[in-house]
């Protein structure tokens, strides 16, 4: 029978591959965003800066502080890669989300499993680079190589998970190949998954099943409770799989962004470390908006690991502020084994 031997949760984002002195490129995008989500409100950049003025975030965006936190994230990602290489799973389930890279508003499934023979990771073309928001091209090495790469899928596990999850009353969309949004800036694997291959697996690729959760786009975003139940169902299905294989489940995304909320991030990590499903589920839903919604990619991992009785090790958490308004990304890296 199959056995889950590793769980991982990893934040991703442009700041992880952008020199700190260049983080202002993303501040340009923050200033243009009229709907920055923070706690139970939505703000323009100037409104958010006024709201958070008492936090003295000017100190957090001094270059030495940014460099120190950037360096800590590089060490944490290196440790994640070391653990993955050491454990050597035979196959992985990659839990992530799409940001209109492969889907479009004509069809956005709440859950989708890609069970194809392979998935392609294709770098931006020159034409696509012209359409990118500020501060994205510089971070491309985070999730794309210089040339296209094809990674092996695992059709048997993919189809098996679809069947077992449907039996557990999860309505899972099935795709033998990655869809392609007509308006997308990419031509292959979304960045949430490319990040795992580039920064965690590195050259130690294993066959993998991409699992998509619609965290970003109303009206069919799964609840935290549903995502936790999904993790438990995944664990049960894998444990019953008639294959002598060692399995990893990896969640990609989070923490709080595009506005950093350290209190939320630390509450979330603490609840997972304590295996406290009730504490996770009780976090108010308004927190899971915008980029912070990607926390839901960690929750199935936490649910599966609770089911397996594996303990969580948090390698590091770093709040990467890029403006005095508090915009930026909380970055966390953790594993269960």
Image (cartoon, rainbow, N blue to C red):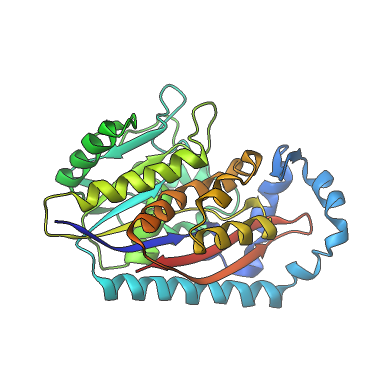
Where the C terminus falls, by quadrant?
bottom left
* Residue drawn at 69 percent across, 48 percent down: 30
Residue 258 position within the rendered picture, expressed as x and y whole percent measured from the top left: 64, 50
Residue 263 position within the rendered picture, expressed as x and y whole percent measured from the top left: 69, 59
Report whether residue 189 is seen: no
Report how many numbered discs are placed on residues in the image. 0
Relative to 218, is 209 above or below? below
Where the N terminus falls, by quadrant?
bottom left
- Towards the viewer: 38 or 270: 270
- Give left or right: position of 1 versus 32: left
* Residue drawn at 51 percent across, 44 percent down: 130
* Residue drawn at 43 percent across, 21 percent down: 106
Residue 302 position within the rendered picture, expressed as x and y whole percent measured from the top left: 43, 55
The answer to which image quadrant residue 3 occupies is bottom left
Report whether residue 34 is seen: yes
- Give left or right: position of 152 versus 298: left
* Residue drawn at 21 percent across, 49 percent down: 153
The answer to which image quadrant residue 64 occupies is bottom right
- Towards the viewer: 34 or 137: 34
Residue 9 position within the rendered picture, expressed as x and y whole percent measured from the top left: 44, 60
């Amino acid at each position: 029978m199959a056995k889950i031997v590793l769980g991982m949760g990893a934040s991703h984002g442009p700041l992880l591959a952008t020199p700190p002195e260049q983080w202002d490129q993303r501040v340009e995008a923050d200033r243009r965003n009229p709907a920055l989500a923070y706690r139970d409100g939505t703000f323009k950049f100037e409104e958010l800066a006024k709201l958070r003025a008492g936090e003295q975030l000017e100190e957090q965006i001094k270059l030495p502080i940014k460099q120190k936190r950037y360096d800590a994230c590089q060490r944490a990602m290196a440790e994640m890669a070391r653990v993955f290489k050491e454990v050597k799973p035979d196959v992985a389930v990659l839990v992530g989300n799409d940001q209109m890279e492969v889907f479009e508003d004509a069809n956005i499934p709440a859950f989708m499993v890609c069970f194809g023979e392979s998935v392609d990771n294709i770098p931006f073309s020159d034409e696509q680079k012209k359409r990118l928001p500020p501060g994205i091209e510089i971070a491309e090495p985070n999730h794309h190589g210089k040339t296209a790469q094809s990674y092996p899928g695992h059709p048997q596990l993919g189809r098996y998970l679809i069947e077992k999850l449907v039996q557990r009353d999860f309505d899972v969309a099935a795709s033998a190949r990655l869809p392609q949004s007509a308006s997308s800036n990419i031509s292959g694997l979304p960045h949430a998954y490319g990040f795992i291959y580039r920064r965690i697996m590195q050259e130690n690729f294993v066959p993998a099943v991409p699992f998509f959760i619609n965290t970003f786009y109303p009206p069919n975003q799964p609840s935290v409770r549903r995502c936790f139940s999904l993790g438990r169902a995944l664990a049960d299905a894998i444990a019953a799989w008639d294959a002598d294989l060692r399995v990893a489940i990896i969640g990609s995304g989070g923490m709080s962004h595009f506005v950093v909320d350290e209190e939320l991030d630390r509450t979330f990590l603490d609840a997972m470390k304590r295996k406290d499903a009730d504490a996770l589920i009780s976090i108010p839903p308004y927190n899971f908006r915008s980029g912070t919604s990607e926390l839901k990619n960690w929750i199935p991992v936490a649910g599966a690991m609770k089911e397996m009785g594996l303990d969580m090790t948090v390698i590091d958490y770093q709040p990467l502020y890029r403006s005095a308004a508090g915009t930026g990304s909380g970055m966390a890296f953790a594993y269960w084994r």
